Image (cartoon, rainbow, N blue to C red):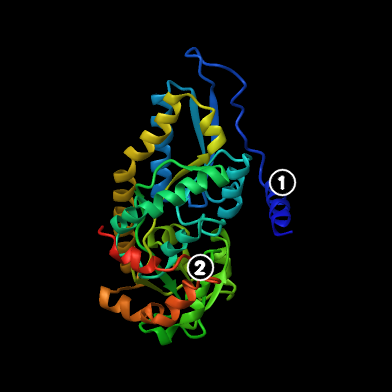
Amino acid sequence: MKRLLAICLSLVICCMLPACGNDATADISDSGEKNYTLKLGTVVASTNSLQTVLEEYAQRVYERTDGTITIEIYPNSQLGTALQQIEGVRLGSQDMYADGLSWFQDYEGMENLRIIGMPGAFTSNEHVVSFFESEKGVQLWDTLESNYNIKVLTTSWGRVPSGWMLQEPVYTADDWKGMKLRVPEQQIWSLAYKYLGASPVPVAWADTYSSIQQGMADGVDGPPNLMYNMSFQEVTNVLIMSKHFYNQAGPIINAELFEGMSERQQAALIDCANELGEMHTAMAYEEQDTQIKDLIANGYEVIDFDTEQQQALFAPLYTDEFKALVEDPEDGLWEEGLIDYVKSLTP
């Protein structure tokens, strides 16, 4: 019955999405390869540095394939919420998507990816990469491709670590009590903030501004440069640079679509994505630095936490009690021992 409901839900979501499949069979190029026009969506604002990187990616792929692959970019949630677009890629109604790589964690068999959303679990982008490239990480990407028809083209696009834009600052775990915080629509965020005493509000990224403006949420968890580009500073009063959540980003593609391409086209999509890892990471951090200076110049409060402050804030999540909750063999969020496994990885 659960499987039937899941299939029905997938079909409903697919019908909600804009028709955006490619017309790969329309014509054949002089090289004998199919011509593709691929629609790549994201929820990130077009003013974010991700847009610049995606435009460069599209240009490089076009040149590397002698024009046989054209990538059209749709930012600002034009093609739906993150979960709708990812489901669209899985089902083939959307060709590509680009965003953080933690979004797949609630698919069956992908549970270990939830550790990415554990506040304070990772200390740097390099630490996340070491997990993604570890045996357990590779198993996740293999599962995503074989079971869900989604291929990750790169894990090298580093994001700035998350913080919060809030109405009031938080300094200790007690400050979370009663606060309504917008979180991604994923289990670990809701569980962690509930455990700390906050009231998590799972809301789509595109609806976050209005949620804060209307009092449904008191603030938002996210990368500062992404929050700035969504103008969340207009409805909040303070940015906490907590650096509690590191993530990597990158484009994904429908795996069946990818398999139907020539080896040259496949290589171009992967190689061009990998080549832009350093550019994406550098631009994200540079963008954030510029934005922080602008916030401070305009009187917006910015508080930069050091490691000790961050660890104190999330100390309740690193007790034996919470570990037993998230690593319970029957009802846990991921496999037993995963927190210690992540800690043992050398960035």
Q: Residue at x 56, y 51 (%)?
A: 77
Q: Earlier in the sequence, mark 2 or mark 1?
A: 1
Between 132 and 209, the residue placed more toward the observer is 132
Q: Residue at x 37, y 52 (%)?
A: 135
Point out residue 311 in the picture as x, y percentages from the top left corner: 31, 77
Read off the residue under disc 2: 333
Which amino acid, by three-letter code, is at mark 2?
Answer: Leu
Read off the residue under disc 1: 15
SS class of the residue under badge 2? loop
Point out residue 267 in the picture as x, y percentages from the top left corner: 40, 30
Q: Quadrant of residue 176?
A: bottom left
Residue 300 visible to an observer of this rendering: no
In the image, residue 164 above or below residue 68: below
Point out residue 229 in the picture as x, y percentages from the top left corner: 44, 57
Neighbor class of circle 2 (other Cα within 10 Å; few <14, some 14-19, many 20+) is many
Between 79 and 4, the residue placed more toward the observer is 4
Neighbor class of circle 1 (other Cα within 10 Å; few <14, some 14-19, many 20+) is few
Q: CA distance from mark 2 to mark 1?
A: 30 Å
Q: Report the quarter where the C terminus lies.
A: bottom left
Q: Quadrant of residue 269?
A: top left
Q: Residue at x 42, y 87 (%)?
A: 174
Between 217 and 151, the residue placed more toward the observer is 151
